[in-house]
Image (spheres, helix red, strand yellow):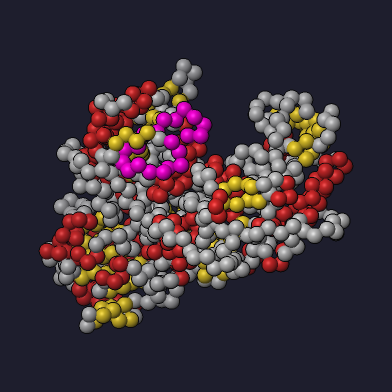
Amino acid sequence: MPKLTVDGIEVEVPAGSTVLQACEAAGAEVPRFCYHDRLSVAGNCRMCLVEMEKAPKPVASCAFPAGDGMVVHTKSDLARKAQKGTMEFLLINHPLDCPICDQGGECDLQDQAMGFGSHSTRYTENKRAVTDKYMGPLIKTIMTRCIHCTRCVRFSTEIAGVSEMGMLNRGENAEITTYLEKALDSELSANVIDLCPVGALTSKPYAFVSRPWELKKVESIDVMDAVGCNIRVDARGQEVLRVLPRLHEDINEEWISDKTRYACDGLKRQRLDRPYVRKDGKLQPASWPEAFAAVAERMKGLKGKQIAAIAGDTVDAESMYALKRLMAELGSPNIDCRQDGAAIGQGPRGGWIFNTTIAGVEDADALLLVGTNPRWEASLVNARIRKRWLRGGFPIGVIGQPLDLTYEYEHLGAGAQTLAEVADGKHSFAKVLKSAKRPMIVVGMGALSRGDGAAVLAQARAIAETYGMIQPATVDDDGDTQPGWNGFNVLHTAAARVAGLDMGFVPGKGGADVAGIVAGAQSGAIKAVYLLGADEIDTDALGDAFVVYQGHHGDKGAHRADVVLPGAAYTEKDGLYVNTEGRVQMGFAAGFPPGEAREDWKILRALSEAVGKTLPFDTLGALRQALMADHETFAAIDTIEPAAWGEFGASGAVDDAPFTSPIENFYMTDPISRASKTMAECTEIFVLRRQPAATGTNG
């Protein structure tokens, strides 16, 4: 490990570190534009010039390897002169349009110009102007502001895995563009907006909407998929204006998907803001007491087995727990949180979570994907797989649809027959898994939500146990405990699914699952169905059953309901969410629900009193205490504990039909994204491949 001196402070840094990293370790602040910790080194902005003793001229610290005995000065006259000279060159062609730039207040160029810029310019020639480029419905370009740091190019190529962006020409004629000026087709494309250190790439849906100092910033958790990305919700008043990523090294690093970022405009469309009761075949506005009375009247006299409840995909854990307790008080065993009918939830917890953890993907040395499209189902997991693949020595096999996953893989087959061949050791990829020290398997909902899902799950477990994916912790000769390895993973698509399984929101003894509830409603055996944000089932198949829908959007469930109870969206309530790896995280409210809508647990508490089965908690704190007392996994916030392993799945015949991903449109998977105008535009361009007509203003 090299030792060097920075501004009189001696530091020791890991081998392979750069001078810039050594400066940071010493607490010295070095300006930079092109350098980013997660991207390759470009060294083209030259803002990070520092003085190094015995060097003939200032060196670019981001690209210069740290060596033993180096003496570096970041604040010397020579270093300051070099940094100020670089800033002067960068500002030669940069337009003075800060008052109308959406990057204003969050601009690296503004901040660094304060420290290293001059009070006036010596440049008297005309500034250059660059034609704006078309990059799709999400990214607005003002390319005259571009300083050619190439962060966007490196991100799209290295992290997102799409080679659609680059720099053309040289010198003053250089321009950043998408080749053929097409939309940047990636689920992670809008991260280039955060990376851009100037106002060249800004958010098109957010253009001219607000200034950052006008916004209230609240930390929360994303519910658009099961990854549990850490996000910051920015709101003005009660309106959510934007969603930005928050740093979490073990989950999303500092990226989020485009759906996470831009579906928030769906929060103000098609909202349920007051209760409704169906009268004379039509939903009519009602007061809360009237809605509760209508539910209580229809519930009166029903036996427990005649009542059922289904929890949706974006529900918080507290609301599910309250509904579970209410159903238990009513004597109903008919509860389920698996809208897609996935054959999981029986046996130990290790059978339904992502045991390797998202960050643990980087430690694996072989991967088998079964019935999943991680690029659409969990974009940040897919990015992590690509990150590991780029290091090399990571063979990947896919059983299911052939897809563009942004990395190379071997397509092994289409369905369960190929999975059985791998399990029996008859397939060539079995040798790859057997020779790997830390192999892993990822099973998606496309394989588990079929009729033979339990048998597929059993085969996947057999592969994990046969090929050394389950390795217990050991104690070495020095008495130190060496961590084990669990390479069996279930990749969920629903943010609420793991929390529901952890608390046992599945059919009780003699109870019906989702398919049984729908069939029972059709036959008349089930007379009342409670839908808690459940919009992904066939609501038209519920027959003549009395349907109560509690949710925040007028989606499929609300259209079928006999009573509608308006709830809160994820940005409007405090709640616990458990991601696909079993990590419990806490989200916070950025605003209040619209109109007469209320937080979901409060609605269930009030309803329980109306039906004569009052729940024993009056505050969110008391509810959480009860939840954690019954299910201790919810008490460990933002931690991962190894899950128990054992028997799960069931032997049986498997279908020869190919595995298919449950997501047909990445941009519309839930009521919020389906109500989003921005997601509708993305669907038109990226899914339906309908390019917008040229208007003369799209570059």
Residue 311 position within the rendered picture, expressed as x and y whole percent measured from the top left: 30, 59
- Viewer-proximal residue, 15 or 634? 15
**Can residue 625 be seen?**
no
- Residue 472 located within the stretch drawn in magenta: no
Question: In what quadrant of the picture does the N terminus appear?
Answer: top right
Q: Horizontally, is 238 left or right of 511 in the view?
A: right
Residue 356 position within the rendered picture, expressed as x and y whole percent measured from the top left: 41, 36
- Viewer-proximal residue, 525 or 269? 269
Relative to residue 571, is residue 61 depicted above or below?
A: above
Specify the principal SS of the magenta part: loop
Question: In what quadrant of the picture does the C terminus appear?
Answer: bottom right
Relative to residue 360, is residue 215 depicted above or below?
A: below
Q: Horizontally, is 245 left or right of 349 in the view?
A: right
Quadrant hosting residue 30: top right
- Residue 400 located within the stretch drawn in magenta: yes
> Measuring 75% from the left and 29% from the top, which residue is drawn there?
4
> Measuring 82% from the left and 30% from the top, which residue is drawn there?
55
- Which residues are the magenta region? 389-408
Residue 207 position within the rendered picture, expressed as x and y whole percent measured from the top left: 59, 66
